[in-house]
Amino acid sequence: MLLDIQNVEAGYGSAPPVLRGLSLQVEDNRSYCVIGPNGAGKSTLLKTIVGILRPRRGTIRFQGESIEGLRPDEILQKGICFVPQDRSLFPEMTVQENLRMGGFLIRDRRLLRERLDRVYELFPILRDRTNQVAGTLSGGQQQMLALARTLMIEPKLLCVDEPSLGLAPGIVDQVFETLTEFRKQGMTVLLVEQNAVRGLSWADWGFVLDLGALRFEGPADGILENPQIRELYLGRLAARGEE
Ligand SMILES: Nc1ncnc2c1ncn2[C@@H]1O[C@H](COP(=O)(O)OP(=O)(O)O)[C@@H](O)[C@H]1O
Ligand SMILES: [Mg+2]
């Protein structure tokens, strides 16, 4: 098992916890999609895995080792990378500078150069724009840069929060193709996706989160046919006027 989350409680400040006893397991070399209504705790889950939030209770083990309570840079060093919803690029820096920042853990300059070359091989568009300031890239190009940057440290587990948000359909296709390419490179991908149909058609396995806990999991392609899920997930979305 790659990641084992048991009974995790986490949240913000002194407010009641958002994650309320959440447990889930992630196996090596698979693709996962987390779905659930707005406010279910999907982003909070990813922030807790990568150490931005510290769990109040419960355990998180990565490759058998406890990681709850470690700092984000320590968790990154263990091989878990995070692409947040806002992509957190350095908008004033060039494409190449952003990629180099992604490799800040790498001390060996030759290795850094090799990784950079590999990123440019996989993303020729970024090579063409190597000296362009990131903030002036299109939304789709920024998302590609944010994803490509994670390759600088070759993580075992990539956590991605809603990478398709606000992108045109053709660009969304490119984002999913990129995630498939990452899978081929041996990365396990844990994707949070608001577009449940799209995310589940890409993933092997689906998790359904609601009210800060795991409500259901199973092979991704059957999830939206499951009447209980339809009721829970689509019903709740409808109740909140999101569909
Ligand atoms: N920075 C924050 N400070 C306080 N509350 C937050 C913060 N971020 C999210 N929350 C709250 O946590 C709950 C879950 O949010 P989130 O994990 O972002 O849900 P999702 O990603 O599933 O839409 C929501 O009720 C939200 O208001
Ligand atoms: Mg979210």
Image: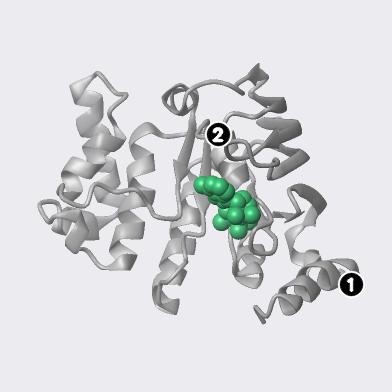
Determine the secondary structure under disc 2.
loop
In the image, what residue type sits under mark 2?
Answer: Leu
Q: Foreground residue, 129 or 104?
A: 104
Q: Left or right: 203 with respect to 86?
A: right
Q: Split into 4 quadrants, where in the image is the N terminus?
A: top right
Residue at 42% x, 71% y is 166
Judged from this view, the residue extending furthest toward the left is 131
Q: What x and y, as percent, mark residue 10?
A: 66, 36
Q: What x and y, as percent, mark residue 26?
A: 69, 39
Q: What x and y, as percent, mark residue 72?
A: 46, 28
Q: Left or right: 102 with respect to 97?
A: right
Determine the secondary structure under disc 1.
helix
Q: What x and y, as percent, mark residue 36?
A: 70, 61
Q: Split into 4 quadrants, where in the image is the C terminus?
A: bottom right
Q: Quadrant of residue 228?
A: bottom right
Q: Foreground residue, 121 or 84?
A: 84
Residue 205, compared with residue 5, is above or below; it is below
CA separation in Å, label 2 and label 1:
34 Å
In terms of sequence position, does the residue under pointer 2 or pointer 1 come before the other?
2
Q: Which residue is mark 1?
A: 227
Q: Which residue is mark 2?
A: 53
Q: Is mark 2 within 8 Å of ligand 1?
A: no
Residue at 40% x, 77% y is 168
